[in-house]
Structures are given as structure tokens and as C-alpha cells.
Image: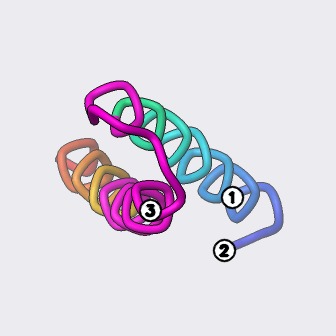
Amino acid sequence: MNARTTFRAALEIVLWWGGLTALWIVLISSVDTLEWAVGAPAALVGAVAARAARRAVGAR
């Protein structure tokens, strides 16, 4: 992977992570530190999975 490809991959994951974290915060009933501590890493896992799924479908 070259620098441009790495940057684009990181940017895609960050955008997915931001969107999924925002969705988590909107859907929960109370926003406190524990919800952020659970939601942010869960959204990161979802972001990596979303990128992997998009790449798998796009490779066909």
C-alpha cells in the first residue's frame, strides 16, 4: 500500500467511526461517560467491519 491508499483507508474508517458513534449517541437514552466508553470502541469495530464489507463487495 502506498501513502495515498493508506490515507484513504484511514479516512474511510474515521468517517465510518464518526457516523456510527453519532448514531449510537442519538439512539441511547442517556449520554454519560460510560456510554461514550462503550459506544466509541464498538463503533470502531463496526467501522472496520463496514470497510472490509465494502471492499469485499467492491472487489467483484
Relative depth, front residue between 53 and 4: 53
Whether residue 17 is situated above or below residue 46 in the rendered picture: above
Q: Answer whether labels 1 and 2 touch (C-beta < 8 Å).
A: yes
Q: Secondary structure at mark 1?
A: helix
Q: Which mark is residue 39?
A: none
Q: Residues within 10 Å of mark 3 (few under 14, many from 20)?
A: some
Q: Residue furthest right?
A: 3
| Magenta stretch encompasses residue 39 | yes
- Highlighted magenta segment, given as a residue range: 24-47
Rounded to the nearest angstrom, the CA distance separating label 1 from label 2 is 6 Å
Q: Secondary structure at mark 2?
A: loop
Drawn side of residue 9 relative to residue 39, left or right: right
- The residue under label 3 is 44
Q: Nearer the viewer, mark 3 or mark 2?
A: 3
Q: Earlier in the sequence, mark 3 or mark 2?
A: 2
> Residue 42, located in which quarter of the rendered image?
bottom left
Pointer 2 residue: 1
For the N terminus, the quadrant is bottom right
Depth check, front residue: 9 or 36: 36
- The total of numbered circles placed on residues is 3
* Dot 1 amino acid type: Thr
Location of residue 13 in the rendering, given as x and y in whole percent from the top left corner:
54, 53
In the rendering, at what x and y percent does residue 45 appear? 35, 67
In this picture, is 16 found above or below 1? above
Q: Tag 3: residue type?
A: Leu
- Residue visible at 39% across and 63% down? 48
Residue receiving disc 1: 5
- Amino acid tagged 2: Met
How far apart are labels 3 and 2 at the CA level? 22 Å
Q: Looking at the image, tell me whether mark 3 or mark 1 is earlier in sequence order.
A: 1
Dot 2 surroundings within 10 Å: few (below 14), some, or many (20 or more)?
few
Crowdedness of circle 1 by 10 Å Cα count: few (<14), some, many (20+)?
few
